[in-house]
Image: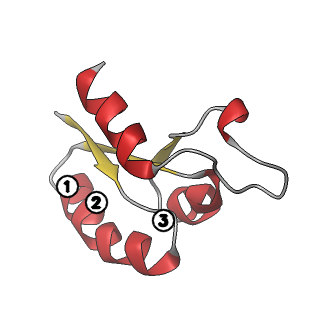
Amino acid sequence: MTHFGILCLEATGHLNTMFPLGRELQRRGHCVTVFSGSGGQTKAQAAGFSFCDIYLAGDRKPGGKTQIASAKVEADLVWK
């Protein structure tokens, strides 16, 4: 069994298009974790996936918006 990670924006339209892929992977016996902003946590977990917030607490401004570009976060995840 392989553990797959799905990295996508936390917007509903982005998450909903990734969920069928995640479900198919689960159906084939794999583990799936969604990597996204905290706004996607409830939806990802309700869909049956593990979740990992890609932002640190210090990355957020008041009101929940992030202060770093998502491209930098993606690059950090790939290269660390």
Asked whether disc 2 touches disc 1, contact meaning CB atoms under 8 Å apart, the reply is yes
Mark sitting earlier along the chain (3/2): 2
Question: Quarter holding the N terminus?
Answer: top left
Of all residues, the one furthest to the right in this rendering is: 62
At x 31% / y 18%, what residue is drawn?
Answer: 80
At x 77% / y 48%, what residue is drawn?
Answer: 61
The kind of residue on which mark 2 rests is Gly
Local SS, label 3: loop
Q: Is residue 65 depicted above or below 77 in this figure?
A: below
Local SS, label 2: helix
- Report the number of discs: 3
Asked whether disc 3 touches disc 2, contact meaning CB atoms under 8 Å apart, the reply is yes
The kind of residue on which mark 3 rests is Ala
The kind of residue on which mark 1 rests is Leu
Nearest to the observer: residue 80 or residue 45? 80
Q: CA distance from mark 3 to mark 2?
A: 9 Å
Mark sitting earlier along the chain (1/3): 1
In-image side of 19 versus 54 (left or right): left
On residue 22, the disc is 2
> Where residue 35 appears, x then y in whole percent?
43, 46
In-image side of 50 versus 67 (left or right): left
Q: CA distance from mark 2 to mark 1?
A: 5 Å
Local SS, label 1: helix
Q: Which residue is mark 1?
A: 25
Q: Residues within 10 Å of mark 3 (few under 14, many from 20)?
A: some
Q: Which residue is mark 3?
A: 47
At x 57% / y 66%, what residue is drawn?
Answer: 43
At x 35% / y 29%, what residue is drawn?
Answer: 76
